[in-house]
Image (cartoon, grey):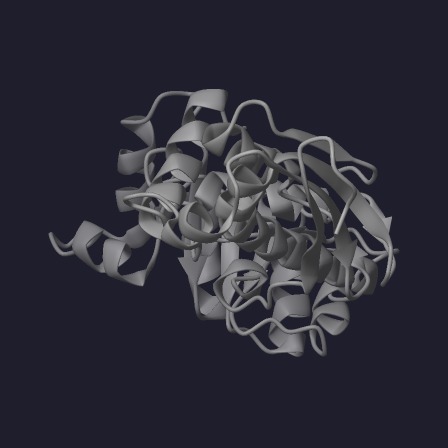
Amino acid sequence: MTTDRELDRLVSAALDEDAPWGDLTSETLIPVDAVADAALVAREPGVLSGSDAFRAAFRLVDPAIDVEFLVHDGERFEAGQTLATVRGTARGVLTAERVGLNLLQRMSGIATLTAEYVAAVAGTRARIVDTRKTTPGLRSLERRAVRDGGGRNHRRSLSDAVMAKDNHLAVLTAGGLDLATALRGARERLGHTVHFEVEVDRLDQLDAMLDGGADTIMLDNFSLDELAAGVERIAGRAIVEASGGVTLDTVAAIAATGVDVISVGALTHSVRSLDLGLDLDVRAEGGPAT
């Protein structure tokens, strides 16, 4: 979850980047008493995410700006639909507009893409999860966007769980211990609540991972036949995760092999932001809209 403090910190950083010494254009051209009524309109269909960040952008610029969402995070919308209304000082609305839109567009893009992956594996046991391939500083928002799209989250950070990859395993066994013994020794040093995941790239590694007490075994860049064989060999003794180059074209076939989890870096590392726009009417205080 993103705390209020964390949300304000990251949105404030974005505002400081965009207007470090104020909005020179608005302060030069826009009367101080001008009021803006704006509609947030979808230019394409999608799934909403990031409304809290959008609100925070306007609130941190001017607490008197009112933002009301008509569509909520996790809900679908269509092209042309009004998603929210914004009302307040024109200077404030114009200053916050780009930061608010940038965050909302990106998070909605993640939620929309995630929903496509989730729909592609419907009817299977597979859960779609994200990875740590997130935008620096925006991980908490991007993880929320994955959930808004119907996906699940992997570990949040390096501090949350053990995830041993090939380089970790090479160092662990450098002293001559066999892999299963080395893994058991590492497992014994952990608290009982810590999840232990290991990555393999060959079927012949599976027995050692199971003997070593892995909670989850990640099958990395396996073929469909190898994934099915891995699921059969693991036989419920660990959670089976598939990873590596997963796309919308391949995810359904991967899910059909019986894996429990499919991790998809593309949900966050190369997603396209949705096209959302803020349409403004501006008037002098008490005057007609223009």
Residue found 79% across the figure and 66% down from its top: 44
Furthest-left residue in view?
A: 175
Furthest-front residue in view?
A: 287
Q: Residue 16 sits in which quadrant?
A: top left
Residue found 78% across the figure and 51% down from its top: 125
- In the image, 209: left or right of 145? left
Closest to the observer, 70 or 118: 70
Residue found 55% across the figure and 66% down from its top: 266
Closest to the observer, 91 or 180: 91
Depicted 54 relative to depicted 241: above or below = above
Image quadrant for the N terminus? top right
Q: Residue 6 sits in which quadrant?
A: top left
Q: Position of residue 240 (x, y in %)?
A: 60, 52
Residue 110 visible? The answer is: yes
Residue found 39% across the figure and 48% down from its top: 23
Closest to the observer, 14 or 30: 30
Q: Position of residue 48 (x, y in %)?
A: 73, 48
- In the image, 255: left or right of 180? right
Q: Position of residue 213 (x, y in %)?
A: 44, 39
Q: Position of residue 45 (x, y in %)?
A: 82, 62
Closest to the observer, 152 or 138: 138
- In the image, 17: left or right of 35? left
Tally the numbered discs: 0
Residue 161 visible? The answer is: no
